[in-house]
Image (spheres, grey):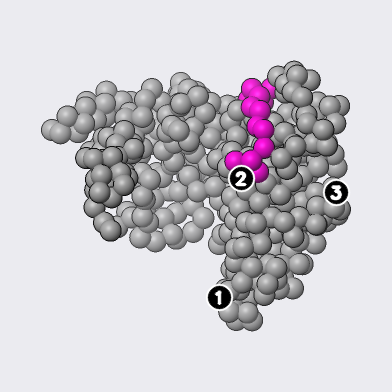
Amino acid sequence: MSGTGGADAGGTPGLSIFSKYDPLKQRVDVVNRIGVDPFNMTFDDIMGPTRGRIGNREIILAGTNNYLGLTYDEAARQAAKDAIDRHGTGTTGSRIANGTYVEHEQLERDLAEHLGKPSCIVFTTGYVTNLAAMAGLAGPNDVIFIDADAHACIIDGTRLAGTTTVRFRHNNPADLDKRLARQAIPEGGHALVVIEGLYSMFGDIAPIDEFVEVAHRHGAYLYVDEAHSYGVFGATGAGIAEEQGVLDQIDFYSGTFSKSLASVGGFCASRHPEFELLRKVMRPYMFTASAAPSNICAAQAALDAIKSRPELRTNIMARAAQLHDGLNRMGFDLAAPASPVIAIRRPNEAQAAMEWNWLLKEGVYVNLAVPPGTPQSSSLLRISVSAAHTEEDVNAILSRFRALKDQSGEILNEMMRKIAGG
């Protein structure tokens, strides 16, 4: 039966199943009146790690999370093509059925070796990685402690686990210390602390070394999501935990292929060999098709580049510092110190959307980030720097932001006209 959710359909008269989204629809309508829908962007062509095309316009890509620029790396592209020639385009089954190929196992061994862990499990996406691993690790008697700015997949992992969840103040080991001391853990249960390395919205870095000390002093396990920092930080690219000298103390380390590893997928590694047993209990791992061979082999080639090409990390840090310094000198309100993620706070959602559209027309693509997906209900223009960006690319981005600041009055007037329907 179809309809609008009337009483005869078992619903509230006059309301549809979509009525709960009316406040969201009003926000979407305002953004769409301002210009292009920023959450339904379509590129006519991607020409490389830093260039795209919309219509006849070439766009500088400054919001793709392509941190090391390896999506167009020749070795990664060739590895993906060769995998298709050998194994076809998909696996058609889960890892516990017909979906495990020799390449899946080789990548797991190589990631484990890079991180110095005895166990590593590869998943179909980074989101599924945290969903599966957290729900597999935590049982009904366990308590999960998560950072207040935790990513959606971490929050959903706690929901799937169905455990007691305690939030602590963002990047605040002292607050975690207090909460671990106060929280009673049921008999037979354990505490699992979940943080991120580089937070994806503000670009701020966690003091992982301090969290290690606090968590382990209370007998808790520490789970670190380094999705946005793996490949970018550390002497060998093993992330912020490596850079802070505590990689060997991380109990569970998760990451994604869709950033530095230039593919689609995810992984979780552990210093506990028993982690392998979770292959038999993690429902999102057991009941979803395994990653396509082309994705696995592209990630394998990107991993090889991470380990053998430290100049990629040198360049991305130099470009991040250049961009952060330039924006700071212009007086923009930056959310965190320099890192590959640079977030600019804007006064409100409408102004951020208007400025996002203006930048796109001027040939620069960044991310528009608004609540509820942002910390502190912030409205942000979010930039992700790539090792493939040149000094000239960053200067071009800075020139557009300088013009944006110079023309802010006219841009705001135009925004008000569009919102009013003029």
For marks 2 and 1, give the CA distance.
Answer: 31 Å
Q: Does any portion of residue 122 appear in the rendered image? A: yes
Q: Position of residue 139 (x, y in %)?
A: 73, 43
User: Which numbered mark, 2 or 1, is in the foreground of this view?
Assistant: 2
Residue 171 magenta: yes
Which badge, 3 or 2, is on the more N-terminal residue? 2
Picture quadrant where residue 195 is located: top right
Residue 285 magenta: no
Which badge, 2 or 1, is on the more N-terminal residue? 1
Residue at the disc numbered 3: 272
Residue at the disc numbered 2: 160
The residue lying toward the viewer, choosing from 251 and 2, is 2
Residue at the disc numbered 1: 89
Which amino acid does the dot numbered 2 rest on?
A: Leu
Q: Does any portion of residue 358 appear in the rendered image? A: no
Which badge, 1 or 3, is on the more N-terminal residue? 1
For marks 3 and 2, give the CA distance.
Answer: 22 Å
